[in-house]
Image (cartoon, rainbow, N blue to C red):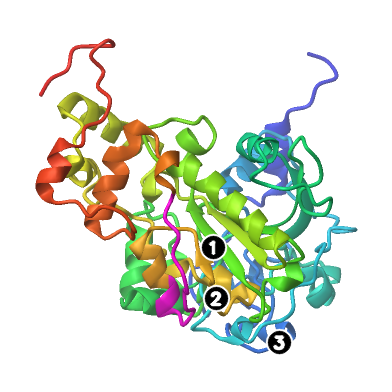
Amino acid sequence: MTGTTNPTKSVMEHYSNRIVLTTYPNQSVANPIPLNWGASTPTSRGPVIVSRSKSTISKRNAIGAHGGSYAIYGALAIASGALDPDFRPNFLNTQPTFNFPTQAAWGDKTKIVSMDPFGHEIVKHYASHIESGLDVRPTIAVTRATMRVSEISEAIKIGRLSIDGNIVLNGQGDVRVTKVAVEPVWYLPGVAARFGVDEVLLRRALFEHTGGNYPELITRPDMKVFLPPIGGLTVYIFGPPERVSDPNIRLALRIHDECNGSDVFQSDICTCRPYLVFGIEEAIKEAQNGGSGVVIYFRKEGRALGEVVKYLVYNSRKRGGDTADQYFQRTENIAGTKDMRFQALMPDILHWLGITKVDRMLSMSNMKHDAIVEQGIPILERIPIPDEMIPEDSRVEIDAKIHSGYFTTGKQFTEEDLKQVKGRGWDAWEDITH
């Protein structure tokens, strides 16, 4: 066709015929800008640089790519001609809507190992690098929003939540919130120490079990920072964000791990959405009472096993007789483990926010509780999900978890009890094999 261009050809022309690898520390193309993780100031710490653009490739000091799990879409956009390979973001007016006060933990390489504590103000701190042509990008963004959740609207309607005009804005359920989005940035020595493993072993496992996608994990021991291709997290703050780090103000906290089927589509096989909206409501109430409410949402779908594994487990449960005593075994049969969320890295965001104690922890998880307390953040009260909010079909999940160590103020279950807790069958849908 006349008048058309070939995007593939134009993109290929951008690349040189020779693929430049920065595989070894002493190559002429490897001249990384110093990155001193744990330095007390952003300038002495240095920017995180991963881009392979022509102006930046020799200055790279980290492994991976920006965007977390979205990095591949960026590559696809370039390959298809939808994105200029040399594109640089214009960061005008993108600065945070709230300047979180610098915390001592930002300069402590043992406290924050899975996110860049200075990742929200790269324009402010690393302007000279950007102006010199280097591709430096944020890994944290802070904004404001108004949210509306149907259960919160119902709580207002029946009078369980009040309209204060500041946090809860109206009877329709509009709620004012400050949001923080965070992409993962791993300081590999710190991550290894958090899990009690050798850094060399961690690097080897990451290399081997991502299909060998990141050879610099093995060949560039001088590069200590890795941007993994995984989901990040979002913080939702109810009430003035400056209250979060004030130890004299009460804090209600919900740590929530992603569950698309329940959180979005309201499947009743688990307690995820009910507990999430309970956490939101309690966070709002705490903020309305002069305290602070925080909900942190981690992208760890299906206990970080993914939805494919999750749905295979569902099939195994429902076809094999869905009883609570077999709940974890169904997952282990397919995934080899019952949980890969590994809460050891989760408290980093609490350190970044300046949280030094949790007055009300809206979670029953022993793993989340232990990870937070082990990082020196006391939890004063634990709040289980109210019984009336637990869907009938999710009793299999929640009762099995209580038996395994989840906190409860209610009944403790024996193995015999668990055998009697059964989920909804598929009898009207298909034949069941036991």
Q: Position of residue 394 (x, y in %)?
A: 34, 37
In which quadrant is the C terminus drawn?
top left
Q: Nearer the viewer, residue 73 or 267?
A: 267
Return the residue nearer the eye: 134 or 182.
Answer: 182
Q: Which stretch is magenta?
A: 372-385
Q: Is residue 64 magenta?
A: no
Label 2: which secondary element: loop
Query: Which residue is under mark 3?
Result: 41
Could you tell me which residue is drawn at 70 percent across and 63 percent down?
289
Q: Nearer the viewer, mark 3 or mark 1?
A: 3
Amino acid type shown at disc 3 = Thr
Q: Would you name the residue on which mark 2 appears?
A: 27
Identify which amino acid the numbered label 2 is placed on: Gln
Q: Position of residue 193 (x, y in %)?
A: 38, 80
Q: Which residue is mark 1?
A: 21
User: Depth-wise, is mark 3 or mark 2 nearer the camera?
Assistant: 3
Q: Per the image, is 377 magenta?
A: yes
Which of the marked residues, 2 or 1, is nearer the chain's N terminus?
Answer: 1
* Name of the residue lying farthest toward the right: 92
Q: Position of residue 96 (x, y in %)?
A: 80, 63
**Which secondary structure class fits the magenta region best?**
loop
Q: Earlier in the sequence, mark 3 or mark 1?
A: 1
Count residues near mark 2 (Cα–Cα under 10 Å), then give few for <14, some for 14-19, many for 20+: few
Within 10 Å of the Cα at label 3, are there few (<14), some (14-19), or many (20+) other Cα atoms? Answer: some
As drawn, which residue projects farthest toward the front? 159
Q: Mark 2 and 1 residues: CB-CB less than 8 Å, in contact?
A: yes
In terms of secondary structure, where does tag 3 sit?
A: loop
Total number of numbered discs in the rendering: 3
Q: Residue at x 54, y 34 (%)?
A: 264
Left or right: 402 in relation to 9: left
Amino acid found under the numbered disc labelled 1: Leu
